[in-house]
Image: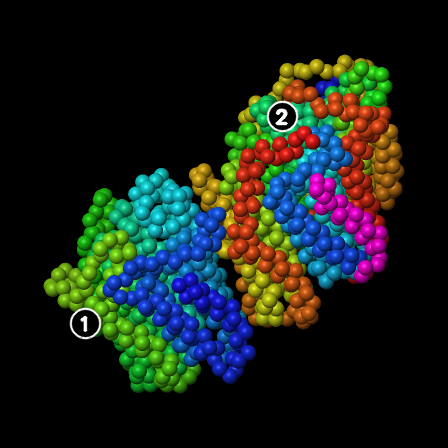
Amino acid sequence: MEFILIGLASLLFGTGIYNLLQKQLLRIIIGTVLVSHGAHLFLLTMARVKTGAPPLISDASSYTDPLPQALILTAIVISFGVTSFLLVLAYRTYTLNKTDNMEEMRGREYE
Amino acid sequence: MSNLIFLPIVIPLLASIVAALFAKQLRGVRLFSQITAVLSLVFISGLTFYIFSEGTIVGQAGGWQAPYGISIVGDPLAMLLVTTTNVIGTAALFYAPRILERQQETFYFYGFYFLLISGVSGAFMTGDLFNLFVFFEVLLMASYGLIVLGNGKAQLRESFKYVLFNLFSSMLFIVSVAYIYSITGTVNFAQLAERVESVDQQGALTTVGVILFFVFAVKGAIFPLYYWLPNSYVVPNPVVSALFGALLTKVGIYSIIRIYTLIFVHETGVTHQLFIWLAMLTMLFGVIGALSTHNVKLIIAYNIIPAVGFMLMGVGLYSPESIAGSVYYLMHDMVIKGALFFLIGALVVAAGTKDLRQMSGVIQRYPLLGWIFFVASLILAGVPPFSGFIGKILLLEGGLAQEEFLLVIVALLSSLLILLSMMRIFVYGFWGEKMDGMSSDYKHIRKLTIPGVVLVGIAIFLGVGAEFVYPHIESISNMLYDRTEYISSVLKES
Amino acid sequence: MIFAIFAPLLLAIIIPFLSRWKDKIHTGWLILPIPFAVFIYFLQFVGSDFQPKVFSVDWIPSLDIALSFHLDGLSLLFALLISGIGTLVVLYSIYYLNHKEQLSHFYTYLYIFMTAMLGVILSDNVFGLYAFWEFTSISSFLLIGYWHHRERSRYGALKSMLITVFGGFSLLAGLILLTIVTGTTSIQGMVDQADTIVNSEFFPFILTFLILGAFTKSAQFPFHIWLPDAMEAPTPVSAYLHSATMVKAGIYLMARFSPILAGEPYVFIILSLVGLVTLTWGSYMAVRQTDLKGILAFSTISQLGMIMAMLGFGTKVALFAAVFHILNHATFKGSLFMIAGIVDHETGSRDIRKLGGLFTFMPVSATLAIFGTFSMAGVPLPFLNGFYSKEMFFKASLDNTASSPFAETLVTIIPILAVVGSIFTFIYSMYLFFNTFTGESQVDELPKHPHEAPKMMLLPPFILVLGVLTIGLFPTIFNESLITHAADAVYGGEANKDIYFWHGLIPAFYMSIAVVVIGAVMYLTKSKWDRIYHALPGRLSLNKVYDWIVAKTETASQAITQFYMTGSLRNYMVLLLTAISAIVISVMLITDGMNFDMAETAPITTSEVLVVLFMAAAAVATIFARNRIAIILIVGVVGYGMAVLFVMYRAPDLALTQLIVETVTVALFLLCFYHLPNLNKSKTTWFTKSTNVIISVVFGLIMMVVGISAYNGRAFDPIAQYFIDNSYKLGGGDNMVNVILVDFRGIDTLFEVAVLFGAALAIVAMIKLRRNKGAN
């Protein structure tokens, strides 16, 4: 099963990157969201799944590795913070630059 | 004692909250920030001296022994860089009120500033790979806040690119952590070092290590991953540029130094050779960039890149000498980049333009600014007896001893071109007939110059007084090269 | 001695504060005593019983960098020149520079130079030498740019700095190699290990690096081009730095390492050839100059070439002559520069075409100039020191032996080039003197009415001319007390001892006579030869090459940088991803990083596969979505899918968090993008599209392959068991993930909150901060 999940995570990365390479702000942000899902999935998968009971103390003999879960939780929250910031930034960028096309925001006046 | 080691990270975090809460009481916040910065600088310097003489202090957060908890490692390298960070930060706090607009200050400059210092210090001190990611995010978030401060049109546009690049590399970071955890089952640096060594860095480990390198390379602005750097360092306020130029890329290069002298050191023929090539290209393309523009701020921003190349060169050569060179250069470059951005900020205010073609004769009205800039340029180019020289001879010695002649020639050539790029500013901007439209607010310009003067003074001391500093750097580099002390001090049974 | 070296520098620091009295008394007077005192200090060592002395202080002992000074004959000769001529130049400058100029700057630079130059020629530590060496370049840069409102000054300053610092960096590489080979940073220590150095595999590199350093500094062909432009500096500087002292630093370097290098076949070939080419080219170019200082600059170049060539010959007599000529050249060229400055000062012009007949107006200057020019020309008269060294040069030029066929050709060419160069030297010397001081005067065309300079201004050149004559008349005194010791140091043993005026009718004498006769004829008929002087160079001159390189560096940098720094996010991403992919793939192949020995996995169940397929479909669908609401919802599907996966894989906390976060994110998305334009069909070319696809696919595949290899490559048990065992016992919680978050890895969580805090601040700042004035 893990290999299928690795495949899915890689697919999320690939489609995310494809969206990142587009011009429109919205698509680019969608790309980052997909990539971050992919990254979290990698973290989950690489530690092996379903090796035991959920990491809640019970009478189970073995548990799933709790550490990656803790790391993913932290990563999810951080991604959330960054994504919210990015959304507002995108919105402000759009209203100030009056375009949502990144190719029109090259900004060569500094050279 | 070992609890004190958390203070360099925790003090700025608390200060950040206080500064943000009372952001509208501008005078109070300024005073609070400056006092806090000075006091913590004094404290951190003391701590650093203690560690230099008594050895590494490891703080195990929450009292959980490594590798299960998070180790905050106050080894001499980390403390040296934390101290340098605080020196530059403190100077920046005295520069900030004179160059920021009031609104920029009230919209949390000081909050972001302390958050940045906290993140940077944490990144230097943490002994845990995932925790490093978290500190990266802290410092990046602070830098996002700083870079958009002011909400200019171009500013937001460049910020967007900056954020995206960093976001992408952060995601790559998480994936690398996943890979590494899968193979080694740990995220603690010291244990990673042991485990990677015991399997001789076989299988996918080197590949994973290289992916991790690219994560840091994006932050450290190494060829060919530095596209985001020049423009995003130009758009914000000079004080923000100074903080970025002095601190941000350096965290990336520090991480490379740490990881590639501690963990991935068993395939140097592949990884470190790669670094040598990348170092060469970084130096060349960076300095080419610096020569390509007439925007004085952009010239300085581009000059960050070849300096990163120099530091990477030391890691790539991987000998005690060259690592010492990298560390010396790292410290020197933090100081001098901070100084240069301060001075360039003052120059832009004094001349009223960023365009070198419209500038001339500034030195006739502002001789102090001119001469300090001149000295700073010499320091940057590695002219003896200043700080840049010490790092440079160590690196060159390392390079020549390994018969990397091409590398040495490229390094020297780019030093020459760095000097050319800086002297163009001096010769065309400062020399010449007095220009029209120069600012005549002498007092303001002098105040803007002084933080730069202080940092240049430190850089001169780091060169002339190298005897006070170098032995420490030498022992740091021996410690990095030897690795056992770091590992044993983190993993020791408590 | 340390004090003697650093006294000028210390004074330089105080000089800016002296300028408050500059209206009452010329700053020069206040600081004149220092170089004179230094001169007297070094004079005490002169004597036939001179023995080398060592003075040393530690500086950075842990790097083997010390301020150690070795005073031998060669250093003593230079130290006397630097301090002696330095004194005269300061005296001269008092009359040359008006007190309204920025004198404090001028003298500060000049005194920094004095210390730097003394340091270069006295340092025994190679890094000390290098440090002082760079400072001579820097002070020279500042002095050339002294009148920086002039475009030419700025140009000349930058040019000299670029070329000499280029050489400086090369020298540094050479010196570091020397320390690596010998394990010492002391020059004397290196000389003792001459064999080790010569036989080392690094020797060709050492030689190349050192020679580049020496040639750029001493203006050897083709690096000489900075020297004529350095004439933009005030004349005292030209007399001092750019003829008597700094430009001899390269000569000094070669002389200093002569005990190691002399006799090496390549050293002979390179130094002799380049030196002679420089001699000939410089003197040829001097004849076509019209600016007095231009003539002197090219003359300096050619004389430096001559000394360099003699160092290349490396024979006893040649080395002696080289040292002797260093002294002689400093005396006559220094005086000539000062006279040129006087002429400029008193007539307002340095253009030799406007000058002429000045003898009647400036008889003293003219008389002094006679001795200077005739000595330079090597006219065989017993009271002109220039003749002595010139004849030794001829003698040495006939005295070489060859070790290879190429060297053999060279040996035969050397005397010819020597004579040709000397003929031109004779011509420009005559040209310099006669066209300035004799002939028809054109007083009306000059900016000022010429008159004799003040007596004190004539004193410095007078003293130098006196030097020319005394050395000429009493060579033995100078020889025994000074020159012999210097020559010994260069030769590394007992050198030549005697200086005679009359050697008998030897070939060298005939050469001298030939030079005088042919030179005289060619000078008298100079107008007929003009075409030769002007035919050759022009568009192809080396200055053009330099300008081209500098301009090209700039335009090429612009072209390269603008080519890839396009500002386009997509281009950057493409470059970044391509680079990462290429390198990661290569590393994976090189280190055999792929691992497809499938490790144990969890069983595959239908429900899981369905979720995965659903998510995959959603991910792919984002690419084709055309509606902004649709795409946001599709991404939401992926997010909720993640939550489902978390549930399936025993991660209840994650599932909950993911659900909340995803819901808020989708809401935020909708909020923010409500105002944004809808997605439009992208008008991208087929090429762009396919690159995007290839890059995404390749990168995804890399992630997958590395992921699988890493999965299969598990080498250790994770540290997880500790948390499982201890979270209740030590952490006091049932939920291991929670215990890890708040306790074991509490710092992560603390700073995760800090990130949210920062994000909140940044969002508030972005929304609320509105500036009135135009951005940026």
Q: Is residue B22 magenta?
A: yes
Local crowd at mark 1 within 10 Å, few (<14), some, or many (≥20)? some
Helix, strand or loop status at disc 1: loop
Would you say residue B277 is visible in this rendering? no
Who is closer to the viewer here, B42 or C450? B42
The three-letter amino acid code for the residue at tag 2 is Arg
Q: Note whether C718 is above or below C268 in the view shown.
A: above
Chain bearing mark 2: B
- Image coords of residue B319 (percent x, y): 51, 38
Local crowd at mark 2 within 10 Å, few (<14), some, or many (≥20)? some
Helix, strand or loop status at disc 2: helix
The three-letter amino acid code for the residue at tag 1 is Pro
Residues at marks 1 and 2 touching, judged by CB atoms closer than 8 Å: no
Q: Which colour scheme is used?
A: rainbow
- Image coords of residue B38 (percent x, y): 71, 55
Residue drawn 39% across and 46% down? C184
Residue topped by disc 2: B195
Quadrant in the picture for the C terminus of chain B? top right
Q: Is the magenta stretch mostly helix, strand or loop?
A: helix
- Image coords of residue C527 (percent x, y): 28, 71
The residues colored magenta run B1-28
Residue topped by disc 1: C382
Residue drawn 64% across and 20% down? C715
Q: Note whether B476 is above or below B490 in the view shown.
A: below
Would you say residue C6 is visible in this rendering? yes
Taking the image as shown, residue A25 lies to the left or right of residue C294, namely right
Q: Nearer the viewer, mark 1 or mark 2?
A: 2
